[in-house]
Structures are given as C-alpha cells and as structure tokens.
C-alpha cells in the first residue's frame, strides 16, 4: 500500500488560535470553563477538552452567573454577547478573524441599506452568528435553486457574503447564478472562503487522480471536512470521512491501494498519524507526502490571554 499524504491538511490558524485560547483559559482560571457551542467541530478535540474540564453549552443560561465563558471559533451574534453581559460572565472571544471579517461586512452592508444574501448552510454555528448581526437584512441561500426563488422589490441594493468553510466550486456556482439574476449585486473586495478551506480543497483536487481511495479525517458536523469528502468522491472515487482509525475496517482496503489522506481544518495531526500507523500495521504501507501549498498564517490570541501566554512561555 502507498499512502499519499496531502499537505496542507488539518488545523488552520483559526483553529490553532481557538484551541490555544481554551487551553490557556483552563490554565488561567481553572475548570470549569464554559464554551458556547463546540470550540471547533471535531469530536476528538471536544472529548479531550471535556476531560480537562471544559463544558460545552448551547445556551448562555447554562452558564452560572459570573462564570468564565469562551466564544468558539465560529463566532456568535450580538444577542449572545448581550446575554453573556447580562449574566455578568467573564467572556473571552476565540472567534476566527476570518469569520469576524464576514460579520463586519454584514454590519457595513446593512448600515448602508443593502439586502445581504448569505451563501451558507442553515443552522451552522457560523451562519447563525453572521445572520445575528443584521437579521432583518440577511437572506440565506444554500444553492442555485434557492437563488432562483429570490424576489426583491425593484431598486433593492443587493450584496452577497459567504460562509468561510464552503466548497469553493459550490459557492462559485451560486455566485454565478446570483450575478446572472442580479447583475448589479455587490460583493466584498476579498473572497470570504478562508485560505485554509481553499488550500485543502485544492490539494484534494490535485492529488485525487493518483488515489484509489481517499480518507478524510474529520467529524461529520465539520462543514469543511464534508466538503473535502464531496470533492474526494467526485469522478467515482471511493471516499470516506472518519474521526480516526477506530472508524476504519480492514476490508475497506486492498494491499495494493493508493490511499490519499487529508484532514479537515479542525482535525488534529495526532489523528492523522494514528490513521497512518493503523494502515502501516495492517498493510505495510509506505508514506509519500505531497506538498501542494505552504502555509504560515498565524492569528493572535484574544487580548486578555496574551500576557498570560507570554508568562507561561517564559516559565518553560
């Protein structure tokens, strides 16, 4: 067996920042630290933090008054921030800066009187946070059929934004349809889909031709991991999305398979390595790393944690 190991893969800068933020918050304040929704959409990461004393909640009411609360990488709406203030919570914000960028664009367009068409997945944490910035001004679409159903009064100023973790190809099709129906539609100066999502999708597109089967490491509720699996499955390729080697079976592979391995932006490298080890043990696999694009992006920690992080680093 030959393993084709895609690079880049796994954690992006936003996920690294969010995970570091939760680790430092637990060290600084001690457990329990409450997190609004999952810190990132990965079951291994969530389980690891639960064992350390993190408590993941779906409503602010679940956090005791005066408790320590971290907002996840996916961002939250102003309503959630106000609810946290009302409960006198010590809130820290680990929202990915690329998600914050979309929030700021939504605020800008809404203040300028635009109706915003948000391309994204209904119910996704990021979409809920973005729509909460200007709920009266945002319409959600998921695909071209949704675009075809849109109706606006003549003269309505329109702009579109996108969820950061979409398939580049899928978003492109929806955007083309929007431009066909509404030629004057406005768009942000820079693409909303995040660099890491695009890079991981690009790697799968370029490397899938040489693979018999593609294994995407990531959780089922991870939007960017699902998009990687969909890309991998194009052209009839065998593709699977799994949390780790525990979800694999020997009869899914052959001794002479060429297996492409990648990982969604919230999947840790330890899971990638344990999957490689499993394939080596069962199929005497060799590994060929294919670097499609280099990444060196880093995002700063939330301000309240920076001095503490520096102290911890100096103490080591």
Image: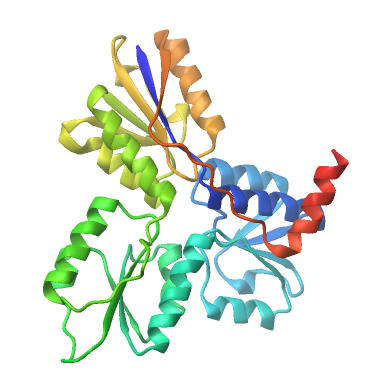
Above or below, 250 against 196 in this view is above
Left or right for 213, reference 29:
left
- Colour approach in the figure: rainbow
Q: Residue at x 57, y 60 (%)?
A: 72
The spot of residue 278 in percent (x, y) is 47, 18
Quarter of the figure with residue 177: bottom left
Question: Which residue lies most toward the right here?
Answer: 315
The reply, left or right, for residue 167 in relation to residue 248 is left
| Residue extending furthest toward the front | 189
Name the quadrant of the N terminus: top left
Where is 245 relative to 311, above or below?
above
Which picture quadrant has residue 207?
Answer: top left
Residue 133 sits above or below residue 144 on the image: below
Percent position (x, y) of residue 59? 57, 70
- At a point 21% along the width and 30% down the height, the residue shown is 237
Residue ID at (55%, 66%): 58
Q: Residue placed at 48% from the left, 63% from the top?
A: 99
Report whether residue 22 is seen.
yes
For this rendering, which residue is in front, 143 or 96?
A: 96
Residue 295, horizontal then vertical, whole percent = 49, 41
Task: Examine the image and state in which quarter residue 190 appears.
Answer: bottom left
Say left or right for 193 vs 308: left
Residue 53 in percent (x, y) is at: 72, 51
Q: Quadrant of the C terminus?
A: top right
Residue 135 visible at all: no
User: From what the image shows, is residue 288 above or below residue 114?
Assistant: above
């Amino acid at each position: 067996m030959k393993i084709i190991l895609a690079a880049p893969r796994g954690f992006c800068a936003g996920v690294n920042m969010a995970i570091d933020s939760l680790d430092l918050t637990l060290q600084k304040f001690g457990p329990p630290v409450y997190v609004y929704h999952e810190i990132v959409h990965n079951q291994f990461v969530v389980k690891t933090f639960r064992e350390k004393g993190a408590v993941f909640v779906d409503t602010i009411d679940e956090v005791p008054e005066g408790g320590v609360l971290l907002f996840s990488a996916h961002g939250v709406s102003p309503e959630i921030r106000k609810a946290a203030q009302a409960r006198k919570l010590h809130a820290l914000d680990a929202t990915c800066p690329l998600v914050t960028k979309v929030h700021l664009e939504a605020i800008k367009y809404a203040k300028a009187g635009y109706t915003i068409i948000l391309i994204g997945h209904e119910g996704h944490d990021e979409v809920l946070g973005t729509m909460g910035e200007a709920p009266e001004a945002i319409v959600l679409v998921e695909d071209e059929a949704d675009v075809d159903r849109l109706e606006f009064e003549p003269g309505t100023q329109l702009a579109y934004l996108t969820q950061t973790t979409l398939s580049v190809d899928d978003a492109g099709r929806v955007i083309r349809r929007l431009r066909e129906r509404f030629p004057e539609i406005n768009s942000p100066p820079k693409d909303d889909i995040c660099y890491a999502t695009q890079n991981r999708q690009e790697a799968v597109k370029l490397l899938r031709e040489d693979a018999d089967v593609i294994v995407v490491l990531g959780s089922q509720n991870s939007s960017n991991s699902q998009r990687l699996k969909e890309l991998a499955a194009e052209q009839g390729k065998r593709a699977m999305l799994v949390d780790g080697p525990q979800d694999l079976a020997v009869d899914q592979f052959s001794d002479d398979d060429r297996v492409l391995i990648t990982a969604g932006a919230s999947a840790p490298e330890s899971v990638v390595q344990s999957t490689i080890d499993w394939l080596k043990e069962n199929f005497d696999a060799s590994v060929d790393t294919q670097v499609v694009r280099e990444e060196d992006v880093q995002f700063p920690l939330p301000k309240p944690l920076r001095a503490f992080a520096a102290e911890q680093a100096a103490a080591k």
